Amino acid sequence: MQYTLVFGLIFALLVGLFAVSNSEIVTIRFPWGNYAVSQAIIILGSAAFGAITVTILGLIKQFKSKLKQWETDKKIKNLEGQIEKQENEIKQHIEEKEKITRELKDYKRTHIEKNKDKGIST
């Protein structure tokens, strides 16, 4: 970031020096009239127009990037919610399986004890 600022200042200084060294009066022709203007004003105006254009285009790009990031964050949040829901469903299935397994073991143990009491081998 600092390198960009330093480079920008050096470039602005060079453009300024170039504009001052080319300060003759030039005629600008438009369909509606002719204007006599210092060439330095034309150079500085063109540089300023270019800087404003680059700034606006940069802001548009930054806005699009933020919008895309916002949409991506929204998708991530939605997917995390789906993952959490599926994890809860898996936990419920595991708990149901463990409950059925305990009931089956209890039933088996009870059945074996009843059969032992009756003298039946399993």
Image (tube, rainbow, N blue to C red):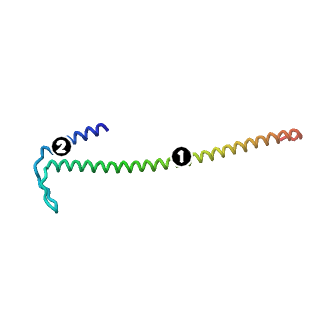
Quarter containing the N terminus: top left
What residue is drawn where x is 13% and y is 52%? 37
The picture places residue 19, in percent across and down from the top left corner, at 15, 45
Residue placed at 36% from the left, 48% from the top? 62
Instruction: List the residue tagged with mark 1.
Output: 80
Q: Residue at x 59, y 47 (%)?
A: 85
Residue under the image location 16 percent in, 42 percent down: 17
Which of the labelled discs sits on residue 4, or is there none? none
Q: Nearer the viewer, residue 46 or 99?
A: 46
Q: What residue is pinned by disc 2? A: 16
Quarter of the rendering occupied by the C terminus: top right
The amino acid type found where label 1 is placed reads Glu
Q: Amino acid at mark 2?
A: Gly
Question: On the image, which quarter does residue 28 sit in?
Answer: bottom left
How many numbered marks have been drawn onto this rendered protein structure?
2
Q: Residues within 10 Å of mark 1 (few under 14, many from 20)?
A: few
Nearest the camera: 91 or 7? 7
Q: Are marks 1 and 2 in contact (CB under 8 Å)?
A: no
